[in-house]
Amino acid sequence: MDMWKRSSSPEETWSDAEGGNENGEWPIKGIVGEEINSDGTSVYEVRWGNWSRKDGTNTTWQTEIPDRADLVNRWKRHQRSKRNSMAQESLDIEVAWPDDDVHNRFTFLRAQAYEEKKLRRPGAPSAADWDKEIDLARRRTDEPDAEDGNAASRLRVRRGTSRSTMSSDSPRPTSVRRTRGGTPFNTPPSSSGRDVTEGSKKITTKISVKSEQASTSAWSSKSSSSDVKGDIMFVRSTEPLHGRALLLSNWNRAAMGVAAAAIRISSAITDAEIGQHLEKFKYMEKKYYFGDPELQSIFEVDKGAFLACTCKRCDRPSHCQCQAESEVVDERLHNKAYAYNEGLFTFYASQGVEVIECNKSCTCGPMCGNRVAQKPRDIPIEIFKTRRCGWGARSTVRLPRGKVLGIYTGRLLRREDVDNLPAEHIGYVFDLDGTEIRGQHNAGAKFSVDSYDYGNWTRFINHSCAPNMKVYSVVFDTIQEINMPYVAFVAVRDIPAGEELTIDYDPSAAEEISAGTRKEKRKISSTALLCKCGAGLCRGWIKQ
């Protein structure tokens, strides 16, 4: 097992560091992460106060914090309680995706409460045919390198003013301007769930610069041996990170900060393939980024503006006050319905209908069945190279029909400002037009979301003329009237682990063909791109 043993961390240099006391010591803010070695021992990530490296990172990894056993014990109690809760909620265990990440195996299992769940499982299931299942999954994901990065090899769809629907008075499907650009990266799940910090209290661990003897001082100097962490950060080496490692660290730190599952990146993607714009990319698992304070003030409506339910258990939509404006209907029973059943999307929300989830003013708890898109993403995502379409996204676990995977995030902006964006941004713009009706006047302001500089894994979802996902509009952080819903992604069929996740960038085109409204041969726009989705019913080209 020596080949998987952690190498020693490079020595830190403190001579040019500022913020320490007269003895060259810095306070430790707290433990924020943990990794498990192959021998079962823990390495803690500690965040330091009043100190950071030139690249802005301020955490190191420590195998022990000798004079603050109380801090370590508190961290252990918190993590143990979390794992016990996970084991009570479900005994499911995610199977590690086949790759070269062997050294993170024990951290991966600890993050899933493996030991706690094993103790609760009444009997071990049969392992028959597991090798066959793993081999099938591996074959599905053994993708060769992507084609070159020329424009024809990337899918780009622009919102067009000529986008039509089946009838002039029907809401059009949400449209998207998308292109394939950079890539996220892959990092293992850490067993940390949220920070354990001291708040305003100074932690009294001391590690001297001159020697590594601990003291009981209220300040600590940086250790010259290993890395330590202090506030949800994942920095495995003390050397500045770049490329794939930097993306993995930043993105998983952000994802874990909101209790979301891990983001991975295929090891086939090299540092050389990651552009500088992605290294500066701000990962936001949830929420929009508001570069315009005025837009933020519009979005963040007063709490009294929400229709709120007083339910203890939301099981009757006709009696749930927050659903008063909902148009989700079960067509079979002709009754008002929730958009979800047992955590899965029911597809009762027809085209153009926004889903209204319970909000912050509702009295129901976080486990309410009408809170789905707002919950943290609980499926791991991997970014990988596709055969034809650059980088794509896939789940490393099987997804059932109706599974909600996440929401599209990025910078929220006015629709009229989209045309002023740099050309490279256009392929990452999603118009919030799910309830707009083509050919009619649509009252109210119109908005779009740009995920070029801010966003999450959904920016890498490719187009397919036969997609395995669709999008729907949903509100929970704000109210319908301001026209700033989130766009959520949902599986339209069971999706095997490793299958690329796709949507139709121009769903109205598919509906027109299906309805037979286009008898004549379709004219190809001069700006259209050749579609490389490979579907049997591929339309051949995509609007740009």
Image (spheres, rainbow, N blue to C red):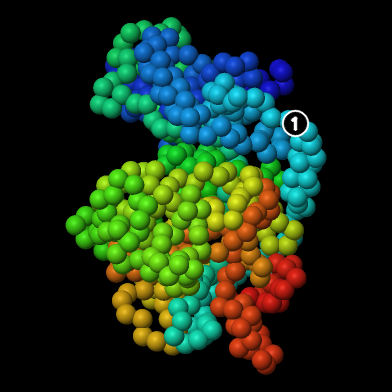
- Give the vertical position of 94 relative to 75 (above or below): below
Identify the residue at image location x=75%, y=50%. 140
Badge 1 density bin: few <14, some 14–19, many ≥20, Cα 10 Å: few
- The residue at which mark 1 appears reads as 127
Q: Nearer the viewer, residue 400 or 214?
A: 400
Say which quarter of the image contains residue 126: top right
Kindly give the residue lying farthest to the bottom in the view shown: 520
Q: Quadrant of residue 468?
A: bottom right
Seen in the picture, residue 133 relative to 410 is either above or below; the reply is: above
Q: Compared to 348, does 420 lie above or below?
A: below
303 and 383: which is toward the camera: 303
Above or below, 47 against 528 in this view is above
- Residue shown at the point (53%, 48%) measured from the top left: 279
Q: Tell me the residue at 32%/14% (across/down).
A: 204
Q: Position of residue 387 (x, y in %)?
A: 74, 58
Image quadrant containing the C terminus: bottom right
Q: Is residue 231 left or right of residue 118?
A: left
Left or right position of 230 against 6:
left
Q: Nearer the viewer, residue 175 or 330?
A: 330
The quarter of the displayed image where residue 71 is located: top left
**Is any atom of residue 461 visible in this view?**
no
Residue 265's x, y, as percent? Answer: 63, 45
Task: Where is residue 300? Give x, y as percent.
Answer: 27, 57
Front-most of 348 and 217? 348
Screen quadrant of the N terminus: top right
Indicate the position of residue 113 as horizontal and vertical percent values. Answer: 54, 27
- Identify the residue at image location x=47%, y=70%: 331
Left or right placement of residue 525 versus residue 287 in this view: right
State the count of labels. 1
SS for dot 1 = loop
Question: Which amino acid, by three-letter code, is at mark 1?
Answer: Ala
